[in-house]
Image (cartoon, rainbow, N blue to C red):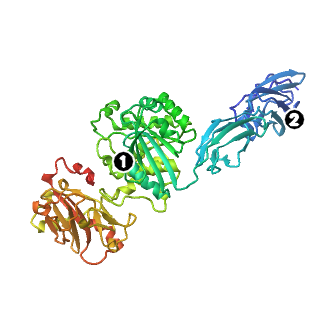
Amino acid sequence: MKKSLILLSAFAMMLISSCQPEELGTVVNPNDPPEMSVKKASFSVDNAAGTVSIPVDANYKSFSVVIDGAAKSWLSFKETKAETKAEVTTHQIVLAYTANPIATARQGKATIKLAALSQDVTISQAAAIPTIKISENERRINPRGETIKVTVTTNDEYNVTTPSWASFTKESGELKVEINGTGAKREGEVVFATKADPNVKATLAISQKAANVDPELINILFLGEARTDSTNVYLYKVLQSLGYTKIRLANVPFDGKTLADVAAATAGTDSLECSVLVDGKNFIKTKITAADGLAPDDWDAIVLQPSMEFAGDYDGGSIDNIVKTLRTYCEFTPLFWNMGWAYKKGASAAGFKSYGNDQMAMYNSIATVGSQVAQNKEFAGVIPVGTLIQNIRTSYVEENVLIDDTELSINIGRLGAAYMIAQYITGKDPLKAATPFLPEKLRYDPDCIPAIQEAYANAVKAPYAVTEATQYPPYTLKFDEASAKTLIEGAGFKYEDYVQVPFVVLHYGFYNSSNGDYLTCSVFKGSNDGNMNKFAATHILPKAEIPNGTLLVVASGYQYRPEGWVTLTTKNDGQSGRPARPGNVSKSVVEVDDDWWGTFTYRAFNISLVSGTPTAAQMKEIGTKFGIFLPKTAISGGLQDYDNGTWNW
């Protein structure tokens, strides 16, 4: 047999490696059967990366190396070296292996093939030294109980031991600690140990103050933004809907102050203004020092909110100083950061200039600060009120979420903020309360409720990014144009001189202006009037939005009552010189003029059948049976002045 040299050519890692040799000399007898002998078929290597050389004697030109299964991820063909002795060529097939990152030994198989011949070679690699780390090693736990995320980094499987009052779920990485109802402070350790070596471990020390176990008691302290008081009125009622009856909401305002100012003031001895809401209606004004207010350590939560103009400025040093002071007096009280909100578009507030008078630039800065604070383990959470407000702005509500450049609107903004604060502090979803709180007295489009709820839910899911709204009122429900044209021209007007303004209605609700501006409807608690099923109501409109010359159109078989108010709190009962409540109107076309307005400055419309109760199908379409047509001469700039179909409230 002539000597021949077989060279292997390597293919890529994870694939079959075929060896295509170059021939040195000629084969004496081409019919000689192939011969192959693997001289060593088992290798043990350490956990570091390296290579093994497999000695193979062969007399033929072509054979292959196949890496088996999962071993392809760490074992690969590298090269072949050949050495010829007598009539046999010994090949050194070199396999490369990566370092073993896990604390478990592993084994791989490579199969050497020559024609019908094959032999397996095993490579056993030692386990790595076990290691384990966790994301934090010490944590104060909310006395009322808390679930925190613990990130475990290890190269091995691990076991967890916890105190009897805590539990850890590996799948989610969540450590759940129960409310401390023992009446005393308690401490414990959560130990994460590798299975390969239980002495390799990481420990999280947890401590928890005794909780006030009264499920109806909650005390919350706010530091920073003065506008918190207006939100707290609704927050009080939202907390009531969640089962709390003993509520104390205190606010120490630092309006227009930087976080450095707040840090200095809380660390000082000067008296600070404080307003306390204890009955849901009235604020008690007082003066306290930081020590007086914090020393009792009976707060269930402390909320820090920067002044609006500085909400997008991150000052980590001042935040740390504030936290240090708070921890001096309130070691275990959960701390929250409340994201502020961006100014109204076009706001003239001086602080807006810092953001280039750009609302989204301001919001993005606020969100960035929130995400930075979220990395501070001293904070139990970041309350994304700013994201909630920005989410609402993507709905038809738009800038009406504020009543001016800075202040949250009486119902929309403040209600949403109250939902958000309650959710984060109590861990309870206000929308899932037995009777969710919703304002009974409406001075705004009631169809904004779905927009608020959607914005709230989206902010919980994505606290640092804007989520576009999908909830819109039924703008498309307009009076049929062909029918409207017939009625309007039949009344002696030119249809082309008018523009129909889309509006929204609340089904199953009505106003009674002789009792004030309350809206009786099924959506809100406490309303069970049997007449609700007969009516749908628009929102209240100011005089400027129904100018003289407007045509009010109603379909045959339907009627409307043009409720009216001199002021929103006036009862139109016809007594003591006050106007009487207007009657129902079924005339197909009415032109608005000074006599129609009289002394009223606000109007709203109850829409109904002339007789009987509408079916569900009729109620769904009731908004198409009444129309408001503005004269084009009264609309400067077009319908955009009417917020694309939703008027200001």
**Mark 1: which amino acid?**
Ser
514 and 464: which is toward the camera = 514
Secondary structure found at label 1: helix
Give the residue number, with chain letter if any, for mark 2.
33
Identified at 52% across, 36% down, the residue is 326
| Outermost residue toward the left in this view | 492
Give the residue number, with chain letter if any, for mark 1.
230
Residue 151 against residue 521 in the figure, above or below: above
Alpha-carbon distance for marks 2 and 1? 95 Å
Return the x and y of residue 461 as percentages of the image width and height.
49, 47
Taking the image as drawn, is residue 203 in sight? yes
Left or right: 283 with respect to 49? left
Left or right: 90 with respect to 172? right
Q: Residues within 10 Å of mark 2 (few under 14, many from 20)?
A: few
Q: How many marks?
A: 2
**Mark 2: which amino acid?**
Pro
Return the x and y of residue 472 as percentages of the image width and height.
35, 55
Left or right: 408 with respect to 96? left
The quadrant in which residue 443 appears is: bottom left
Return the x and y of residue 254 as percentages of the image width and height.
39, 36
Secondary structure found at label 2: loop
Taking the image as drawn, is residue 458 in sight? no
| Outermost residue toward the bottom in this view | 612
